[in-house]
Image: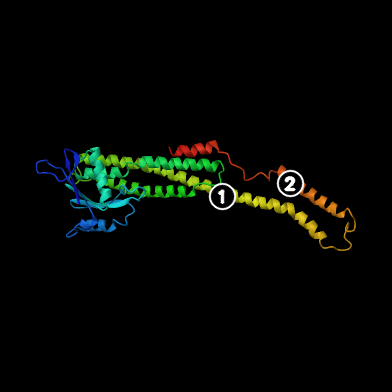
Amino acid sequence: MRVWHIEDGRLVEGSASDSTGSRGRIEALDERELDLEGAGHVLREAVAQMPHAYVPFIEFAPGMAAGVITLPAGASNGAPPVNVGVVLEPARLRLIGQMEACGEALTFLVRERVPMAGAAGALCGVMRYAVRDHPVLLSAVRRDFEVLEERLLEGHRRVDRGKMMADARRLMGFDALYQGMSDIASELSEGSDELVAQGDRLRFHSLARMLDRLSTRLESLQDYSLQLNGLYQEEIDIRQNSVMQWLTVIATIFMPLTFITGWYGMNFPTMAMLQEPWGYPLVVAVCLVIAVAEIVCFHRRGWLHFGGRRRPHPSRHGSARRKTK
């Protein structure tokens, strides 16, 4: 277990001495270190749901609150976020779960000298730490979508479908995170003075507004993702139609030629031009004339122009991009 305390409105690592006048104690502990002997139903339920919770939440009981939040997985680059149990009391906050994730979040608050009035303020700082990089991440996803849109509109046949799906899954996870964190921040911003100090209620209110802004931006990116999926499916349909059109043109060209050659292949003795020395060259010439005439006809009707590159449509491209900004 690691311990921090609040001194002069800032978080300091270590236990408080009697002379410091600490406003709160913050503990980060492993789940195995948590003693549930005599714990209430709310705390037991939060600990039971911690490994499986998809949406962050908090539940209230007399004199305390318990729930689950999501934190970045420490220094493990690329690792998925981890669920962390939260137990908030008037003068104590306990973070239960992966020690590395909890320790890095609290160390960040110490390093940045984040202001807080009590233990609830430390929880607000930890929640804000969990989403501090999300504006940058959402901008990166938007850039990925713009690059993909450019490639699709230019008619590229190969796009990074895996990256597009990974970004879509990331947005889905962000949706659950913002929804749960926003609910927690809103409920604590209206909490009692016993559990949440006035200054910390204002901080939770500010956090809730920030999460609402992120949710609005996320919603526009999800709409953008749906547009790109539709554009990608449209490109696949165009490609399939192009293949079917080629096959139709080829079959149409060879159908009369097959009829002529099959007719003369029956070798009836009374068929015209079988005994003439110029009969075979004439049939070949007729077949060539038919094939050339069909190709010219198809070309004039534009049936031989397909599968080309599509040029970007300025209005469509601009409107999709403006919606995400």
Q: Position of residue 28 (x, y in %)?
A: 22, 50
Q: Residues within 10 Å of mark 1 (few under 14, many from 20)?
A: few
Identify the secondary structure beneath mark 1. Answer: helix
For this rendering, which residue is in front, 35 or 281? 281
Quadrant holding the C terminus = top left
Residue 141 x, y percent position in the rendering: 42, 43
Whether 269 is drawn above or below 191: the answer is below
Query: Looking at the image, which residue is at 85% across and 52% down?
Result: 281
Q: Hey, what amino acid is under mark 1?
A: Ile
Relative to residue 5, is residue 125 drawn left or right? right
Q: Is residue 317 above or below residue 291?
A: above
Residue matched to label 1: 236
Circle 2 residues within 10 Å: few <14, some 14–19, many ≥20? some
In the foreground, 111 or 226 = 111
Precedes in sequence: disc 1 or disc 2: 1
Taking 261 as reference, is 76 left or right? Answer: left
